[in-house]
Image (cartoon, grey):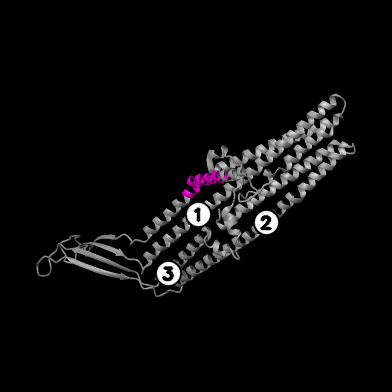
Amino acid sequence: MQPSILSRVLALTLMTATAQPVFATTDITNSGATHAQINASMNANTELKQLISWAIEHDAGIQQIHYQADAVQDMGVATSQWMDPKLKVGVGGLPVDSFAFDDDPMTNISVGLMQQFGRGNTLGLKQKQSDQQANSIREKAGVRDLELENAITTQWNELVFQQNVYGLLQKNQTLFRELEHYLSTNYGVGSNQAQDIIQAQLQIGLIDDKLQANQQMQQKIKAQLSEWVGDNAFTMQANNYPDWVVLNGYLSTTPESNYQVLVNHPSIRMSDLLIKSSETGIDIANEAYLPEFGVEVMYGYRQANGMGGQPASDLLSVYLTMDIPLFTEKRQDKKLSSAQHQLGAAKAQRDLLLRQMNAKINALAVDRYNLEQRIERYQDSLLKRAKEKTHAIERGYQNNTSQLDEYIRAASDELTLAIEQERLQADLQKTNSSLAYLLNKF
């Protein structure tokens, strides 16, 4: 092979594997970023935000949460009302020998109303508790919002990775097609061995398979995204990673503790409302020690005459009922104890959730730091070494001390390193998305 031709082919390989736009970070504030890269990042962020907004607006899960909250709140209004009054109709003092209403002056036809009242302020407290529970459920909508943002952003980042890899494979395939063409031409005049041509053709076939697998993965990702963004998933253009301005701004302050941010997370706010609901449950349990009152009013109509021969007067009866909670050991005391245990469990659950979320943030921060270090190593060392190796094999091939398959392996190794670096970039984006979910910093 003539040195000029091999150098041209090799240069295309190195340009493919180490092109700066492929490995550039997604921070659009980078002074080295081109105007086109900045515009691409801004357009990608705009499209991603539009997809997320559409998904949140049309999400059936969020609608379900709001329906559940409204149901709990309406039920709270219903259970906080007085019991329906009871109508009482009957006959009293009816003589059994004649069953006549006008024989005995004690016989009367009675009509009455009974009304039971709530125990203390129990009814008002029940409505308050229902409102707290409904608000707690509504906080789930905030959690669902973050879950959608995290899920869509994660799939978006994976799609960007696959598209970047697809571009690398296409360029590498172009290289080997040119190489195969050149070898075929030289083979026709007896300059190259047939095995070199077969090796180049084999490499082209392997890349074809990788390209098809890549397309399959892209279609699968879009199909998964259609769960949240509908048919928009099949027309979206995921050309760049998010810029993470809000997240980077927070992390750049090097916070000593994340708890101040975590307390505003919808999951923690939901736990706070459950704690308030449990505290209200204790107030309701305390009201059980108070008596419960009821009023009964009866009117008796009499048809018989009285002892003096005059029509007997009708009767009016008014009763006040009251239960007396005397034996509280097995009822009221246990209800109060149960409510107190529920409050303790709610507080413990909140503390546990805070610790778990903080631990996840710390673990993700470690991953983020190490991923950035590894990406820097790829950019500053590994890819340069791979390029030097390819150059060395090129010189050996020119001097007939290396074989073509060695050159092909070197070019393939360089491509593999480029893809591995893209994988690290995608993993870094996934880590950023998880951090943004926990810190509410999308």
Q: Is residue 340 magenta?
A: no
Left or right of 190 on screen, residue 142: left
Residue 22 vertical placement versus 90 (above, below): above
* CA neighbours of label 3 inside 10 A, class few (<14), some (14 to 19), many (20+): some
Residue 142: which disc?
Answer: 1
Gap between marks 2 and 1 measured at Cα: 26 Å
Which of pointers 2 and 1 indicates the residue nearer the eye? 2
Q: Which residue is mark 2?
A: 367
Gap between marks 2 and 3 measured at Cα: 46 Å
Front residue of 311/155: it is 155
* CA neighbours of label 2 inside 10 A, class few (<14), some (14 to 19), many (20+): some
Please state, as top left, top right, bottom left or bottom right, where the N terminus lies in the image. Answer: top right
Main SS category, magenta section: helix
Image location of residue 103, percent across then percent down? 15, 63
* CA neighbours of label 1 inside 10 A, class few (<14), some (14 to 19), many (20+): some
Image location of residue 36, percent across then percent down? 61, 42
Image location of residue 188, percent across then percent down? 84, 24
Give the residue displayed 9% in from the left and 70% down from the top. Answer: 308
Front residue of 72/90: it is 72
Which kind of residue does numbered mark 2 sit on?
Answer: Asp
Q: Which residue is mark 3?
A: 283
Question: Would you say the residues marked 2 and 1 are in contact, meaning their CB atoms lie under 8 Å apart?
Answer: no
Q: Secondary structure at mark 3?
A: helix
Gap between marks 3 and 1 measured at Cα: 29 Å
Left or right of 325 on screen, residue 181: right
Left or right of 253 on screen, residue 212: right
Left or right of 251 on screen, residue 305: left
Magenta region: which residues?
A: 44-63
State which tag comes first along the sequence, 2 or 3. Answer: 3
Image location of residue 56, percent across then percent down? 50, 47
